[in-house]
């Protein structure tokens, strides 16, 4: 593997994204594929969708340049294409959730048919556990879950794009340490495209990811983490990708729990996601996004440290994560009947009222 080629691919992909994105903005405006403000969406004016195309096209060119190799990539590429097309159709026609879920399952089946799945866990002191038929179930839950998790946090300008960029950065650093070439190639390409797109997507956004982008990014994150971090899976390496993707995973879990406790349908949209809660606390749009970036970066650093940590340090990291997750749970209002002891203490420390 040549790191100089990776750097060249990074520069090419980022430059292409910066060049292509304005063209996608014009295309979306011309076709009328725009997001309109409503009770939940507080942006000004009509914002173009189809941002995923501005990420997808440079990524494909970057892949052609680096030519990563893995036995499962054909199935992965087919699945990614299905996800992209589904996102485009949804951005244009606003299809029903069940249709999106069906397409996601078809894309996941394409991945499974290529042989890529979570097959076993190696638990310390207990040895290796073959998941058997549950390999399919866990793999489906992982891919579909992360695909939708990224879609759910795409609620503020630059939020999903930045969180994904931080996740890919963490995965890239770990892949370099482990020497996993295919993950290095793919992570570097996606990171480059996301950073280029973020120039146009950060507040005030000139273009949104749309389902085209959020689902494609989520699907890609799920797959790339499997290609590298689930290799010869141990109980700790299984935890690592969860740590990296803590924000989208747990915001989704909190949303499901919150809606179940309120006896709402789990697909019912609301304004109680972490980013909306921070806005209601009085933080500005940019500040809210930067706070969540900070949380994501914290979890990313924890994941990197976790991969080479001793047993004691691993438990310390998990303890810090539990405290951070409890804080996130307080923000989303699912603990103590809405009470926020940790958050209140933090407010007192920084003199917030």
Image (spheres, grey):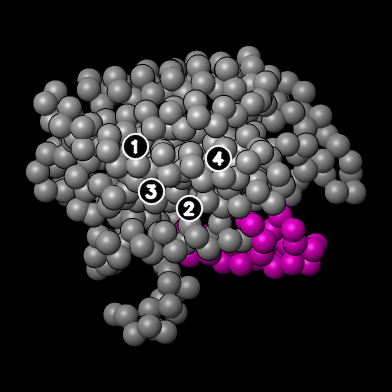
Distance, label 2 to label 1, CA atoms, is 20 Å
What crowding class fits label 4: few (fewer than 14 Cα within 10 Å), some (14-19), or many (20 or more)? few
Q: Which disc, if any, is residue 166?
A: 2
Q: Which residue is disc 1 drawn over?
A: 16
Q: Which one is closest to the eye, mark 2 or mark 1?
A: 1
Q: Which residue is disc 3 drawn over?
A: 195
Residue 186, relative to residue 296: is it above or below?
A: above
Most prominent secondary structure in the magenta stretch?
helix
Is 330 magenta? The answer is yes
Q: Does the image show residue 232?
A: yes
Residue 112, relative to residue 224: is it above or below?
A: above
What crowding class fits label 3: few (fewer than 14 Cα within 10 Å), some (14-19), or many (20 or more)? many
Q: Which residue is disc 4 drawn over?
A: 5
Q: Is residue 126 left or right of residue 38?
A: right
Tell me whether the residue at label 3 lies in contact with that at label 2, contact meaning CB atoms closer than 8 angstroms.
no
Residue 113, relative to residue 152: is it above or below?
A: above
- Quarter of the figure with the C terminus: bottom left
- Quarter of the figure with the N terminus: top right
The stretch of residues the image draws in magenta is 303-331
Q: Position of residue 140 (x, y in %)?
A: 58, 26
Tell me whether the residue at label 4 lies in contact with that at label 1, contact meaning CB atoms closer than 8 angstroms.
no
| Occupied quadrant, residue 347 | bottom left
Distance, label 4 to label 1, CA atoms, is 16 Å
């Amino acid at each position: 593997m040549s790191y100089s080629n990776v750097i060249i691919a990074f520069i090419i992909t980022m430059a292409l994204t910066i060049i292509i994105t304005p063209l996608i903005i014009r295309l979306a405006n011309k076709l009328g594929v725009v997001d309109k403000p409503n009770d939940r969406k507080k942006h000004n004016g009509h914002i173009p969708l189809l941002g995923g195309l501005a990420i997808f096209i440079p990524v494909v060119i970057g892949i052609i340049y680096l030519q990563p190799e893995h036995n499962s990539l054909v199935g992965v590429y087919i699945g990614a294409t299905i996800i992209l097309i589904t996102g485009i159709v949804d951005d244009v026609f606003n299809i029903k959730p069940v249709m999106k879920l069906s397409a996601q399952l078809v894309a996941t089946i394409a991945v499974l048919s290529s042989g890529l799945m979570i097959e076993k866990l190696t638990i310390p002191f207990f040895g290796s556990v073959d998941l058997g038929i549950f390999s399919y179930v866990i793999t489906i839950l992982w891919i579909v879950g992360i695909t939708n998790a990224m879609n759910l946090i795409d609620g503020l300008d630059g939020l999903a794009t930045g969180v994904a960029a931080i996740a890919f950065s963490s995965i890239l650093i770990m892949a370099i340490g482990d020497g996993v070439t295919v993950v290095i190639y793919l992570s570097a390409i996606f990171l480059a495209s996301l950073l280029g797109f973020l120039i146009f997507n950060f507040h005030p956004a000139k273009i949104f990811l749309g389902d085209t982008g959020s689902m494609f990014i989520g699907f890609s994150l799920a797959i790339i983490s499997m290609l590298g971090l689930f290799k010869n899976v141990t109980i700790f390496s299984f935890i690592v990708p969860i740590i990296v993707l803590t924000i989208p995973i747990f915001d989704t879990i909190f949303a499901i729990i919150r809606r179940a406790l309120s006896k709402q349908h789990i697909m019912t949209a609301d304004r109680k996601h972490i980013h909306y809660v921070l806005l209601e606390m009085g933080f500005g749009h940019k500040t809210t996004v930067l706070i969540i970036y900070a949380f994501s970066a914290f979890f990313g650093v924890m994941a990197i440290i976790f991969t080479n940590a001793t047993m004691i340090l691993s438990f310390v990291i998990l303890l810090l994560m539990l405290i951070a997750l409890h804080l996130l749970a307080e923000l989303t209002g699912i603990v103590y009947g809405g009470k926020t002891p940790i958050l209140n203490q933090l407010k007192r420390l920084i003199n917030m009222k």
